[in-house]
């Protein structure tokens, strides 16, 4: 027998087996799913064709594949996220004082150490999604002087920290901490320290004391969700207690 006849005989044998097994009537002959090929940059693969019902085992659990067609669609989506998300973070420093005191209620902001540009947080909003309480971050004084104070937008740089107090500022303004702010309780000592040190390198710390100037507490000690929103109302960060 020639090699050609032997090869034809082999093909005929497999054809008979295929026909006995159902031939073209078998669902798998034409059923999907299939994956579209990538033919150009920027494309992604998608599924098409009818999926065959069945199940697969993953980590010891059985998952049904169902019979729906087409690629799957995500069931959840993060909405209203700020471009500053991941660059600045909101912390919770509320003190459980026996008597509710807005001067003992704090929030904290911290900027990521890899941020390359300053972040202007003046006009950003802090709000409770539970109580509806809402307040805007004010301007502040970079070079805090006794007497006439110049205020400007609060701009945080990489690694900067801001402590946000609900109550009133002892000097009627939010301010950037410096090497003399520990003397603020005695204004004459602060003025003397400021005159001696304000021109020295490292006088300003980059960290801020921000006051919301409210006479009562804004946030719940437990069961609250507090959000930080940027100037466009986008959610930068949040926490729940």
Image (cartoon, rainbow, N blue to C red):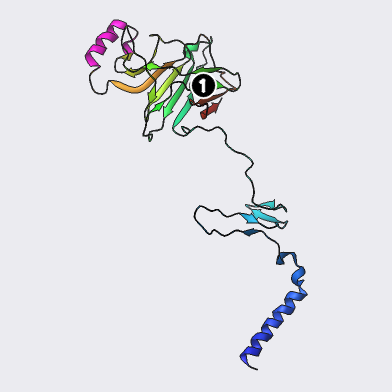
Q: Quadrant of residue 141?
A: top left
Which residue is at the front of the view, 1 or 223?
1
Q: Mark 1 points at which residue?
A: 126
Q: Quadrant where the N terminus lies? A: bottom right
Which residue is at the front of the view, 92 or 97?
92
13 w.r.t. 239: above or below: below
Q: In which quarter of the image is residue 223?
A: top right
At horizontal 52% and vertical 16% (from top left) the residue drawn is 96
**Magenta stretch encompasses residue 2:** no
**Along the horizontal axis of the image, is 225 left or right of 137?**
right
Where disc 1 sits, the SS reads strand
Of all residues, the one furthest to the bottom in this rendering is: 1
**Along the horizontal axis of the image, is 146 left or right of 48?**
left
Which residue is at the front of the view, 157 or 107?
157
52 w.r.t. 216: above or below: below
Measured as percent of width and height from the top left, residue 9 is found at 68, 86
Measured as percent of width and height from the top left, residue 64 is found at 71, 52
- Which segment is the magenta one? 182-198
Q: Main secondary structure of the magenta part?
A: helix
**Along the horizontal axis of the image, is 144 left or right of 132?**
left
At horizontal 22% and vertical 20% (from top left) the residue drawn is 200
Q: Quadrant where the C terminus lies? A: top right
Which residue is at the front of the view, 77 or 107?
77
**Along the horizontal axis of the image, is 208 left or right of 230?**
left
Q: Residues within 10 Å of mark 1 (few under 14, many from 20)?
A: many
Q: How many marks?
A: 1
Measured as percent of width and height from the top left, residue 122 is found at 43, 21
**Magenta stretch encompasses residue 187:** yes
153 w.r.t. 33: above or below: above
Measured as percent of width and height from the top left, residue 34 is found at 64, 60
39 w.r.t. 100: above or below: below
């Amino acid at each position: 027998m020639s090699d050609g006849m032997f090869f034809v005989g082999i093909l005929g044998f497999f054809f008979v087996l295929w026909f006995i097994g159902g031939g073209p009537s078998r669902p798998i002959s034409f059923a999907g799913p299939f994956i579209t090929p990538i033919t150009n940059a920027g494309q992604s693969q998608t599924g098409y064709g009818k999926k065959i019902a069945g199940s697969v085992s993953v980590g010891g659990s059985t998952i049904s594949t169902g019979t729906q067609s087409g690629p799957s669609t995500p069931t959840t989506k993060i909405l209203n996220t700020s471009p500053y998300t991941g660059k600045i973070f909101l912390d919770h420093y509320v003190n459980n004082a026996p008597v509710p005191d807005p001067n003992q209620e704090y929030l904290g902001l911290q900027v990521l150490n890899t941020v390359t540009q300053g972040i202007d947080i003046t006009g950003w909003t802090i709000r409770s999604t539970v109580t509806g309480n809402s307040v805007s971050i004010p301007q502040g004084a970079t070079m805090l002087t006794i007497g006439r104070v110049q205020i400007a937008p609060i701009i945080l740089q990489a690694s900067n920290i801001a402590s946000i107090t609900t109550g009133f500022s002892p000097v009627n303004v939010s301010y950037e901490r410096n090497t003399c702010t520990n003397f603020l309780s005695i204004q004459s000592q602060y003025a003397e320290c400021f005159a001696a040190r304000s021109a020295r390198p490292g006088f300003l710390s980059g960290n801020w004391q921000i006051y919301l100037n409210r006479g009562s507490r804004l946030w719940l000690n437990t069961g609250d969700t507090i959000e930080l929103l940027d100037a466009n109302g986008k959610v930068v960060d949040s926490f729940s207690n």
